[in-house]
Image (cartoon, rainbow, N blue to C red):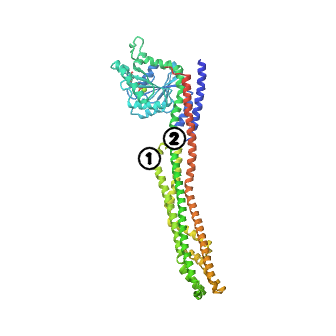
Amino acid sequence: MEQVLTRQQGELVALERKLVIRVRDVLANSDGPRADLERLASLVHEMDELFLLVVVGEYNSGKSTFINALLGDEVFAMGDLPTTRAISILRYGEAGPPEAIGENTNLYHYPLDVLHDLDIVDTPGTNSIERMEEAITRQFVPRADLVLFVTSLLQPLTASELDFLAHIREWGKKVVFVVNGVDRRNSDEQLDRVREYLTREVTSRLGGVAPTMYFISALQALRGKLASTAGAPIPDPRNEYPALERYVLETLRETERVRLKLLTPLGVLRHLLKGNVAALEGRLVVVHEDARVLRSIRDQLDAYTAEMRTDSERYLIEVRNVLYELERRGRSWFERTIRIGNANFLRNKEAVENRFRAEVVQDTPQAIENVVHRMVDWTVQRNLKLWSTVFAELDAHTARLRESGALAAHGDTEFQYNREELFARLREPIERRLSDFDAEREARQITESVKEAVMSAFGVNVLAIGLGGILVAAFTTAALDVTGVLTATIFAIAGWLIIPARRKQLIKDFETKIAKLNEDLAALLRAKFEEQLTRYERQLLEVVAPYERFLETERTKLDKGLDELRQAEGEVVALEQRVEKTFPASS
Ligand SMILES: Nc1nc2c(ncn2[C@@H]2O[C@H](COP(=O)(O)OP(=O)(O)OP(=O)(O)O)[C@@H](O)[C@H]2O)c(=O)[nH]1
Ligand SMILES: [Mg+2]
């Protein structure tokens, strides 16, 4: 039977070890806290070590006295002031002076049989003003296989003890309560009241089953052992020290010890997994929040682009209307001017051109220039507004995250570091763009490029003039085309009879010309405008895209990490059940 249990124990240890290593790898890959990684690394070794019975409690509660009683010897110093200053591990061997092993840890040896199977650890008391000593004890708790929690009968379960107990519970430790100092009781009823009080408070405040308790007098027990048989005091029937000693010396040499030892790594895993699942979930919230903000930025960019397209059509309609007016004036001008009575005038090419310019072309180029300017200004202004909104949104977003604590919670992890760095990289170019934004200069540049396009499209080649001048030139060319044809043809094909037909033809030519002009101008403006929109779009996307990629990577990593951690959580539960089934609790 023993052999079967040993084999099963070996199997379980192997499974646990594999799980611990796997969880450590998963945590390492998901930027888990360094302290957790270290804990898991030492856990792998601790699994091979002896069972660790750790005695904890507030200073002066009698921890050292209790261990001395167990040994029947005054191995550890006892005293009314905070006495034990370092973790003191007691191991089987020849008694001798303690040996310092690592910071704050001393190793003692004593030839007590039970120490073949377990190490007993005395700890610095908690709740003294030496908080450092409490920290040492807290740090040591995760290693314990069983915790003996020593509290004083005269002051059972203080607030700080409750807090410390909660810490022990987090690591899934089994705790046995030792109420020390029964020799100081006023009455036996006092013991019953304390037992009742402890049971009630522990179950209601910490949850779980009723605590295992021993009411003892460590001092009496120690004195009893040290005294010669003749001088031994009469045993106190309410001192449960003998039962506690039996528990430690006997029960802990049986299945119970194996069971608890096997449960220790699982408790540690359970605790670390819980914390890390919560941390990853928290990061995932941040990543989703970030992604939402980036989506909103993209949406705004889309809205901007769509709005600009619609608006650009509105401006193009304005251009078309200006040209309609021109066309209307032209038509009536031809009707009025191409008449026999105007023969003399029509012979004068220059006069015809001048009048055509004055009466038909009028301020058309300026009007169009004006529309173009407004269109460009609007585009630039709206783009500036887009960047400001994006900037404000990013800032509000970070403020929200800071406020919700989503950023602070993971202050020490690589995730946080990357995120802050990337965020700065996202924010910085936006801020720069805003501070460098010179709407006037930008509008001038765009207008300049429109000007160049008009020049090349309409074959105008005039140096050093603005868009207005270019348009005037373009219109003059178009106008001269028509009037040139007018003066040239009317007199080449003599015969006044055909004048009405000519006029009709000229008007038609003129209309075609204007339609073409309108078409060319619209196409040109549209192309220029699209070019500008694309540039604006690219500018913003160049800033946002790396961050989107980072988030995508991060999300995949977190999802994977969470999956793996949750799966490990499931395995911890399964292993716990297997341990409980193979090595059932003794009581
Ligand atoms: N009356 C009485 N006194 C006790 C008992 N156990 C311990 N004491 C006394 O209480 C004082 C503290 O005992 P220690 O064993 O040093 O207490 P500790 O918990 O180890 O204290 P720290 O090492 O400071 O954390 C000593 O003076 C002991 O003699 C007991 O059962 N009854
Ligand atoms: Mg002590």
- SS at mark 2? helix
Residue 572 at x, y percent in the picture: 55, 31
- Quadrant assignment, res 563: top right
451 horizontally vs 402: left or right: right
Q: Residues within 10 Å of mark 1 (few under 14, many from 20)?
A: few
Residue 13 at x, y percent in the picture: 58, 27
Q: Dot 1 corresponds to which residue?
A: 403
**Residue reaching furthest right?**
493
Q: Amino acid at mark 1?
A: Glu
- SS at mark 1? helix
Residue 133 at x, y percent in the picture: 43, 32
358 horizontally vs 72: left or right: right
Residue drawn at x 55%, y 36% is 566
- Quadrant assignment, res 231: top left
Mark 2 or mark 1: name the one nearer the start of the chain: 2
Q: Eyeballing the image, is 157 above or below 504?
A: above
Q: Amino acid at mark 2?
A: Glu
Q: Eyeballing the image, is 555 above or below 8?
A: below
Q: Dot 2 corresponds to which residue?
A: 281
Q: Is mark 1 within 8 Å of ligand 1?
A: no
